[in-house]
Amino acid sequence: MDGINWQAWVYPAALGLMSALVIGNNLFHWARAITRHESTSFTLFIGGLLGAVALLAAPVPAMKWLCFVPLLIDPGTSWVVYGLWKNRKP
């Protein structure tokens, strides 16, 4: 059978779509909270972790080293890392 093995892309595509939806939701609520001077509740780590797992599950080996990118894009993950860094003890 010629072409792409589409079955190998089912789980990475589904995880990537869910990741994009959660990260998009976090970004929307974060921007809305900034403009309205309110607080927000992120779905912590979920979007970034789903994206990292999607890239690790992708059948292309060159994509595996990009697994940290969704963690950096997700504001929930970034906020937790910032809070841990800010409250660290010297």
Image (cartoon, rainbow, N blue to C red):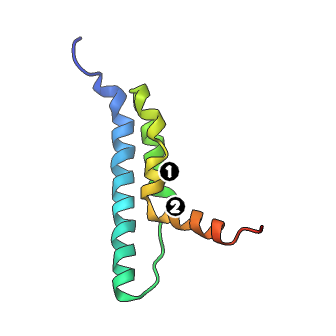
Considering the numbered disc 1 on the image, is that residue within a helix, a strand or a loop? Answer: helix
The answer to which quarter of the image holds residue 20 is: bottom left
Name the residue: 22% across, 18% down.
3
N-term mark: 2 or 1: 1
Q: Residue visible at 39% across and 52% down?
A: 19
Is 38 in front, or is 84?
Answer: 84
Residue at x-position 39% and y-position 37%: 11
Nearer to us in this view, 83 or 10: 83
Whether residue 87 is situated above or below residue 44 in the rendered picture: below
> Mark 2 touching mark 1, by CB under 8 A?
yes
The quarter of the rendered structure image containing the C terminus is bottom right
Q: In the image, what residue occupies the spot 34% across and 34% down?
A: 10
Which quarter of the rendered picture does the N terminus lie within? top left
Residue topped by disc 1: 49
Q: Is residue 15 above or below residue 2?
A: below
Residue 6 left/right relative to 88: left
Q: Is residue 51 above or below residue 12?
A: below
